[in-house]
Amino acid sequence: MSTPLTHADRHALGVRARKQLARSAHANFEISACPKAPLNLLRDSMRGRVTRLVQLKYERMVASAFGFFRGAVPIMAADLASHPNTGITTQLCGDAHVNNLGAYAGFDGRLVFDINDFDETIHGPFEWDVKRLATSLILAGREAGIRRAARQEAVATFTARYRSSMSEFAVMPVLELARYQIHRLAHIDPIPAIMATAERSTPQKILTKLTEPGSAIPRSAKKNAQPLPSPARRFRSEPPLLERLGPKEAQTVLASLGPYVRTLQPERRHFLAQYNPIDVAFKVVGTGSVGLRDYCVYFEGWSRPESSDPLFLQIKEEALSAYAPYLPEDASGHTHQGHRVVDGQRAMQLTSDPFLGYTTIEGRDYLVRQLNDHKASLDLETLDPAGLLGYADLCGELLARGHARAGDPVAISAYIGNSDRFDRAILAFAHTYADKTEHDWDLLKKSFKKPK
């Protein structure tokens, strides 16, 4: 092991970074510095995706400015990379926005609330996540019809909480930081409503939503012959969003579970071995991920009666992070993109999906995780000013915790300092970039042609 830097050395590193990029300079964003036309960046990101689904991705992005923002990580990655950065790196979520934080079930059955989407995760400048999440608060507030002053207050609250939390983490013992939990969730609007939704999102609910009883198979052609018993439930077919796979394709997907199992901890392999795969489907998910290959496998536990112990695993294709072209080659440290996502997720989250792993199918990299197990996130349609403010406060603490767990909280805290100089600059950036996002969205709407 190399000798670690002292606390004083790490603090000095953070202060020196202000010479590389002053805190007030985060407010500066020049569209003229952006290297490529936004729609060209979007088009380039579609390469390798399922062609028939590209139109659907554009439809989801055209629906709203926030929807556009969700699918436009390649644009923001290029824009951020075209401007100076602090040089203080940590593990990035990469797609930090208000709907990529949410509830899910931990291994002990508790509901957890944390950052929960890491498709774009990579090691990069810490402020890139801060800027993306701050911008998302502005856009979410605009979509919810929340007035400008309340949106500004939300971003100011987010950055102030990020700053104060990072200052706390900078002096916290290592293991105390590793175990740090947020105990005030029940008192932060709108978290109780999100948790209540997550509580209801059980595997049995998913079973009802995504599957249907199998058709009875005739025993023979003889008159009055009784049909065979109905087979196990199977996925519904609702193209293009959900499509059952044929036997050959399903077998290819199931074969990938062998390499995947080897990425799990031994006790979790034991639990997974007590489930039998029943059916496989192709499923469209999210906005940014539309067009990537995404499979769902429906399992049943062998120790319980039929359809009473369902498990759903998602096998999701992972492409190169949108930030990778703008960062050093070793920023990811992985050649397998599913492995990159798994390690990034485990680094930033307090607790991760017990069945989180990765595999390969026909030369493509995939992440494996549970599908919608007690998952829920922010509902923009019901968001009000108080909810946005409370949520922004929690976002600041959660993002700071993720960055501190995976990076150097001392250097980050020393760079940000105790004043609100960094906060004010991020607010100015968020307003400017939200405006650019809406301008780019207008360009897409003008160029978009719905199929006849």
Image: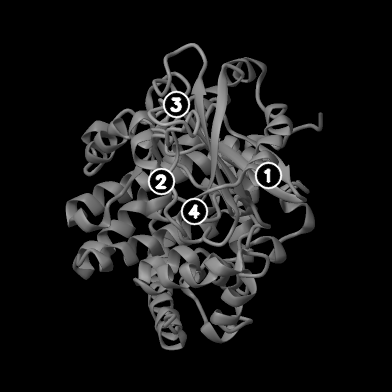
Q: Which residue has dot 3 on it? A: 310
First in sequence: mark 2 vs mark 1: 2
- Are the two marked residues, 1 and 4, in contact with CB atoms closer than 8 angstroms? no
- Are the two marked residues, 2 and 1, in contact with CB atoms closer than 8 angstroms? no
Using residue 62 as the reference point, say whether residue 82 is left or right of it.
Answer: right
First in sequence: mark 3 vs mark 2: 2
Q: Residue 346 location, x and y as percent? A: 59, 35
Q: Secondary structure at mark 2?
A: strand
Query: Mark 4 and mark 2: span between their CA atoms?
Result: 23 Å
First in sequence: mark 4 vs mark 2: 2
Quadrant of the image occupied by residue 10? top right
Q: Which residue has dot 4 on it? A: 416
Q: Residue 313 location, x and y as percent? A: 53, 35
Quadrant of the image occupied by residue 241? bottom left
- Are the two marked residues, 4 and 2, in contact with CB atoms closer than 8 angstroms? no
Of tags 1 and 4, the one toward the viewer is 1
**Does 377 sit above or below residue 1?**
below
Q: Give the amino acid at mark 4.
A: Ile
Q: Residue 362 location, x and y as percent? A: 75, 49
Q: Which residue has dot 1 on it? A: 248
Using residue 39 as the reference point, say whether residue 448 is left or right of it.
Answer: left
Query: Mark 3 and mark 2: span between their CA atoms?
Result: 25 Å
Q: Quadrant of the C terminus?
A: bottom left
- At 54% from the left edge and 81% from the top edge, which residue is drawn? 39
Of tags 2 and 1, the one toward the viewer is 1
Q: Which residue has dot 2 on it? A: 101
- At 42% from the left edge and 81% from the top edge, which residue is drawn? 450
- At 68% from the left edge and 44% from the top edge, which residue is drawn? 248
Q: Give the amino acid at mark 3.
A: Pro
Please state which of residues 218 and 51 is positioned toward the viewer in this rendering.
Answer: 218
